Image: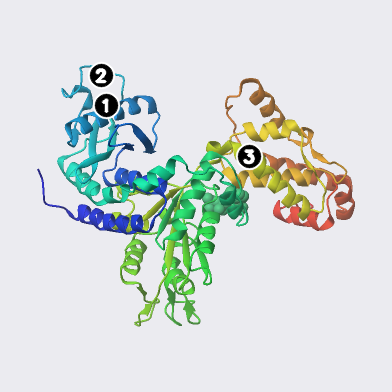
Amino acid sequence: MENSFNSGDILKLESLIELAQILGQQGDYDEILRLIVEKASQFVSSDSALVMMINPKTRDTIKTIYAQRSADDEQNHFIHINVSGWVIINNHSLLSQNIKSDNRFRKNLFEKSIVKSTLGVPFKVENVIIGTLLLLNDESNSSFSESDLSLLEKFSAVVSPFLHCTQSIAQYFIAPLPKQTLLSKYAMLGLLGKSKKFIELLQAIDAAARCDVRILLEGESGTGKELVAKAVHKLSTRSKNKFVAIDCGAIQPNLVESELFGHIKGAFTGALSDRKGLLEEANGGTLFMDEINNLPVDMQSKLLRVLQDEEIRPVGSNKIRKVNVRIISASSLSLQKLVFQKNFREDLYYRLNVYPIFVPPLSERAGDIPMLADYFLNKFSAKQEKEIEGFSEEVLDFMKLHHWTGNIRELENCVERLVTLTTRKQKFIDKKILPLELQKELKKLKKNFTDIPITKSLSESLADYEEELIRKTLIGVKWNQSKAARVLGISEHDIRYKMKKLKIKRA
Ligand SMILES: Nc1ncnc2c1ncn2[C@@H]1O[C@H](COP(=O)(O)OP(=O)(O)O)[C@@H](O)[C@H]1O
Ligand SMILES: [Mg+2]
């Protein structure tokens, strides 16, 4: 058994202490389980992880929570049940480099599985097993080691006491499901939805807002990460101070430092006066660091120092200033993978990712599409002074079936365009205004419900179509903008705005 830790392990132990601090503040049993399973999975970089809580008397499973569901769920679940059973019966942890040839299990029991390595530890309170934690690695990933096992046993020892609130478990069974309060609370902050995935997201946000910890939001572009960050800020004790956002992907690498830390006059060519950095701007409040994966490497170490010492030094200055900022970061790529590829500092990753929240893509919450579409319809109808009541059934079908690669942002843009293309007289958005290729897509989607290859994104093709329509109309009325606006059923303000946005000019 290996007992010495390397620097990576020390980082993990530090973040384990942070985890214990959060768990101590957390009253939500489900959220405690979710954090535990996610953190465990990160600690030993596993492909999938599961916590199974059991009733110590009857040994019935009372709750299972997964992290990183993989494609092979059924097989994984089968392994989980078997390994969990072994851990409980033997009252011992289990490390298996290759579960398929492990003679502690019946021969060929797991032959269908793609899982190779397995790690299982019990959660114990007063020497009674109350649950198990299981981690799996696929054949493509590396095997778990003795030091992973040792780390995970320490992990279990630290988190187990937080799982022993039988009162909360009992409450769990009678847990009231009216999520209406939660939904309306967040609807007021602009977050709409009602699907299961969305409710889970809100529960995580709600729980995170209660503790003043750093949050890492991971999810595809356009899923609402920034909106979530704003909601957390508004609900936190920092809400009276500023919410400041920086897009690490949009700023020139050599300007990031002065942007974050500020500069003094003359610090570099073009620094004509002193300027406060965003970290100071957000003092007492929240700094949202979007696309943190794009943070240049030298800035990664500078940011790390800020997080450790809570102080900044503006570019060109030799004076240090104290700041107190909560950092919420967001990434559309898996930061853990970047750490693995050595493209992101591991120590910074652990410091930013104190509280992980995954924001699901729209495809995982398709049930929310009609509600979101309707919300955007009202928003843009009002903006364009139209009185459109709704979508025709076919357009709605299309929206439900279409694969929104740009997520909510793409849906929002699409509805905006559809509203523009609908004349004042029309009460419903009809499929006839969909560009031909999308009408074709609709037909196909309805026929076989499977994805067809689409060369352009919906918003791109809508933009093309819109541009063509406006251009043709303008040519038809000899570039008289008010006439064109009337023909198209939009205001003159709108047509000017559209012409500018779509770069339509008289040739
Ligand atoms: N749950 C939601 N309800 C309503 N609008 C949303 C929701 N989530 C996101 N949006 C809207 O979708 C757009 C994209 O969201 P944003 O937070 O910028 O996504 P991301 O930061 O993940 O790229 C924004 O206009 C935002 O207001
Ligand atoms: Mg964004």
Which callout, 2 or 1, points to the residue nearer the camera? 1
Alpha carbon distance from label 2 to label 3: 42 Å
When asked about the image quadrant of residue 321, the answer is: bottom left
Residue 258: x and y in percent read 44, 71
- Using residue 140 as the reference point, say whether residue 420 is left or right of it: right
Residue 98 quadrant? top left
Viewer-nearest residue: 194 or 347: 194
**Residue corresponding to mark 3:** 369
Residue marked by disc 1 = 82
Residue in the image at 64% along x and 34% along y: 400
Q: Position of residue 186 (x, y in %)?
A: 58, 53
Picture disc at residue 109: 2
Looking at this view, is 346 or 194 the one in front?
194
Dot 2 and dot 1 residues touching (CB under 8 Å): yes
Q: Is residue 68 above or below residue 74?
A: below
- State the count of labels: 3
Q: Nearer the viewer, mark 2 or mark 3?
A: 2
Q: Dot 1, how many residues are within 10 Å of its Cα: few (below 14), some (14-19), or many (20+)? A: some
Does 11 appear above or below 271? above
Tell me: 310 left or right of 367: left
